[in-house]
Image (tube, helix red, strand yellow):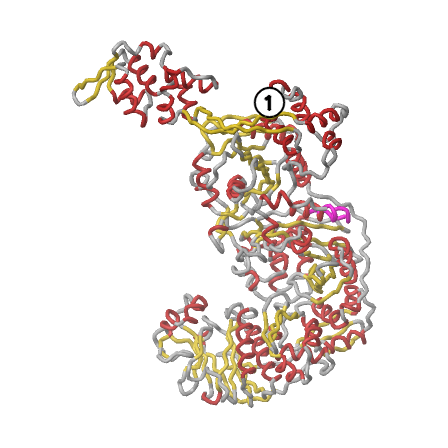
Amino acid sequence: MPNVEINLNDLGALVGKKLSLERVREALLFVKGEIDSVDGNEIVVDVKETNRPDLLSAEGIARELKGHLGKEKGLAKYDVKSSGVKVIADASVSAVRPCIAAAIARNVKVDGNFIKQMVQLQEKVCLTFGRKRKEAAIGLYDFDAMKAPIHYKAFAPHELKFVPLEYRVEMDLDEILKEHPKGKEYAHLLQGCKKYPILIDSADVVASMPPIINSQATGKVTEKTRNLFVEVTGMRQETVNTALNVIASALAERNAKIESVQIVYPKSRITTPDFTPGKISVDVSDVQKISGLELGAADIVKLLRNAHYDAAAKGKKIIAEYPAYRQDILHPIDVIEDIIIAYGYEKIAPAEVKIATIGNELQNNRIENACREVCVGLGLQEVLTFTLTSKEKQQRMMELPEQQFVEIANPVSTNWSVLRRSVVPELLEFLSKNKNCPYPQKIFEIGRTLALDASAETGVKERTQVCIAISHKNANFTEIKSHLNALLQNLGIKYETRAMKHPSFAEGRAAEIVALGKCGILGEVGEKVLKNFLIDAPVAVLEFEI
Amino acid sequence: MKIEETAQALSEIERNSLIALRDGRLKNAGQIANSAGMNIDSARRAIMWLKEKALVDLIESAKMHISLTTSGKEALQKGLPEKRAIEAIHKAGGKERLIEIQKNANLGKESDFVLGIAKRNAWVSLHKEGNELVLELTGLEKDLLQGKYASEIALGKIGENEKLSEAENEGLNELIRRGFVERKQIIERSARINELGLEALAFAEKFTERKYVVDAGVPEILLGKKQPYVQFLGNIRNKLVALGFKEMPAPLITQEFYNFDALFQPQGHPARSWSDTYQLKQPKFGKLPDARIVSGVKAAHENGGNTGSSGWQYKWNEEIAKRLMPSAHGTAHSARQLVKGIEIPGKYFAIARCYRPDVVDATHLIEFNQLEGFVVDKSFNFRHLLGMLKQFAVEIAGAEEVKFLPDYYPFTEPSVQLSAKHPELGWIEFAGAGIFRPEMMLPLGIKEPALAWGIGIDRLAMFKLNIKDVRYLFSDDLGWLRKCAVVQ
């Protein structure tokens, strides 16, 4: 869920109305936004919708608010003139990063808010909608420093040199990928390519190396910049078009004059930005069925216009036109939600759910509860530990030989890097943290353990185990076996114990529990293990699958 | 307190002690214990209590008391080191190398000392054989072997609390030096009944029942209890079962297919990235369900298939869907249940252990529980969704007022957030919900609307358990668990 930083005065100027914090808070509900924090006039808005790149800046949010505050209805209309400028896409980019879209924004008034919002929009769109620049990378340039036409062409790693943004030295393309921080961060996007994409003007000045970095020469926007060149590169034309529409319409909200650019591909030509609205048909009956509201076609059209759609009733259908910067409308259901939001959730009367069903808990849960009841009857305190743990605790501290664990690929810390095979080490750690608590200490846990199992649907066998640990100066095998006996007798389970050697237990004080289809262990924890856990008092444990 | 009341509140041992003291003679705890037929510790306690109530006078005298130390007790059992040494020589045929004796008799640091005693008593003669010292019995060791060794006799008597003879007393200091015996000053208390005591006794004998001091403290009992958070979750489960919900299985490990793909979350989506969810290093891949369902999900992602959607317009990769991960949210279990098959109308829920890479602190856990589920029926619409949420807020959180706000979830449309006004917490984000998207349901062959919901139960649990630190849900503090009141 992206956070968008906004200045309240800037937002007010964009909407054309001074807005109180409270008013903004209410209005943001229409765009699924919530104020996360406030610092004077600076607010941070949590935009919950992750498929609305147009809401990732003050301009886009302001535009939506205008609709819901009644200042603007229907589609936002932006005039687009042709600039006559061409971007010539060479065949060499088709194998690397084939698509590009571009626009020119004239008469921009660059100030602090402008730069802040454009940088933010560019970053957030690339991160979310652009899938970390893979699907869309955006560049903004000082157009007055560029000579048209602009070429989009691939070059070999050592064929070309330029000064990357905020750098002073020239680097070749390979050096940029290996040494520049942005190069290193995004190099994987160009991995395996023999040539790298470059945007270069007719004076042979490099503008950028998409999707990595702009050049210092033209790829820098300052308060002196008057005319902007904007481009988006990526893998699919539709995606780069949408991203360009988001940026261009945001610039238009700041009163820039948008001009189109012709993209000349080897075999085709297109003109961008293309603000032609999307079209979708929605059945009035579906709106009624899903919303539970008695809305007529006219009501629906009115609500859609508040939500920046153009709409017209056609028989039992509504033909809705949505802005070109929106790409989240995949299905009529998405339009229906916008209708309900525009209607106002607070005005809808909840209806009672009246279906007769029989409730039921899982069978496994009933067994767990029976087991829990016996343990409590035995005077044991239940505890709850985590299933994420470390190999160190589960294996080495238990003096066990190498074992296979269900293992996390991207742990935050080695303390939480595998899923437990046994509950025993977790209870020992619990005891070691409570040495100052009065003894005897008698605890139990009923919890899941995990082991590899190639035959299972997830490759993992998950078991529910009961684990009991008893610690005091005379804790011994007999006492823990008495507990086992009481537990299994009361659960109606017949069992046998067989003496065994086990590295975690004291010699001659360990046994395996054998019951129908289930198994477990019990015994006195060995001295070495106690020492590993820094436990002073003797401990006897049992663990059994239920 | 009046003397009558004091008398009535006497405990069994106080009363019996007073009876033993009735003759007015000065008696120590041992004597009282003997005549009252109780153990000496009870008698000691009783006279202290009687003294506090001013029913007896105490006379204290300091006495030296000698007793065995732990190694003294051991020596009494296994024999003194010198005896063990002589026995070892005897066993070897009357002559043995010192090094062997040290080993066989386990002399340890007593070795030099033993050698000294043996020479002093002329039990052995010493000579060298090669480089080794050899000890040979002289015949004077007989008394020792027959149990006539004064130090040994003294040790036995001290153990039995008997008086030592003069000869035995002589060796006492040596035994103390060697750490077998310790000498301590003890205070012996003797009691004599006083007038008030006699008066109390007269009353006491009239009452057959003891009167309790009801405001006195009592010993603590450690009892067996359920873990409070487990208990809280159990109560929630009962509530949902009572509302007609069926519980769904909630495995800890899931295929990405159920966690994401079946929920119409595109494969390149940032929410699927490593920083937001855990992935497994081993095992890596699980199995996918029925091919028909997989191809339906694939089509929905790629171009919408027959769902009326445009889909996400990318190439869906089956291998990514097979990848395994610890469940990141409870909706994964709803997806699994929907694939497995459901009853319509139906109500389903899961209490799901979920995982999220994070740093553990007072407000974050990497392992936590979510309450998730859905209800499904052909008659349902958005108003039923609101109605269901309101019922949850009232039944589960005891909410007084609710508010519905637009929200976003990748798998529901329309989506809603419910804020509930809790009597003590104020407005809280209580639940997220929505109607499952057609792109999700149609590939699974379900046409009826399903109202999906998830409730943030940890916040409620923290309130119920009166804790500020979320880590206490999995508390490792035994003292706190013992004190924590049973959850109702």
Write down the quadrant of residue B418 in the picture.
Answer: bottom right
Task: Please name the residue shown 68% across and 42% down the image.
Answer: A362
> x%, y% of residue A269?
53, 81
Asked if residue A105 is positioned above or below residue B366 in the image, the reply reads below
**Nearest the eye: B189 or B449:** B189
Q: Nearer the viewer, residue B33 or B443?
A: B33
Q: Does the rendering let one see residue A452?
A: no
Question: Which chain does the numbered disc 1 sit on?
Answer: B
| Number of numbered labels in the structure image | 1
Residue B194, given in percent of the width and then of the height, sits at: 66, 27
Q: Which residues are magenta?
A: B237-247
- The quadrant in which the C terminus of chain A is found is top right
Mark 1 crowdedness (10 Å alpha carbons): few <14, some 14-19, many ≥20? some
Q: Which residue appears at 46% of the width and 83% of the height?
A: A220
Residue B475 x, y percent position in the rendering:
59, 48
SS at circle 1: loop
Residue type pointed to by label 1: Leu
> Where is mark 1, residue-wise?
B26
Q: Which image quadrant for residue A305? A: bottom right
The residue at 66%/84% (across/down) is A77
Q: Quadrant of the N terminus of chain A?
A: bottom right
Where is residue A196? Give x, y as percent. 41, 73
In the image, residue A122 above or below residue A415:
below
Q: B270 or B420, which is in the foreground? A: B420
Left/right placement of residue A436 relative to residue B77 reads: right
Tell me if residue B239 is in the magenta stretch. yes
Q: Is residue A499 visible?
A: yes
Query: Looking at the image, is A362 positioned above or below residue B158?
Result: below
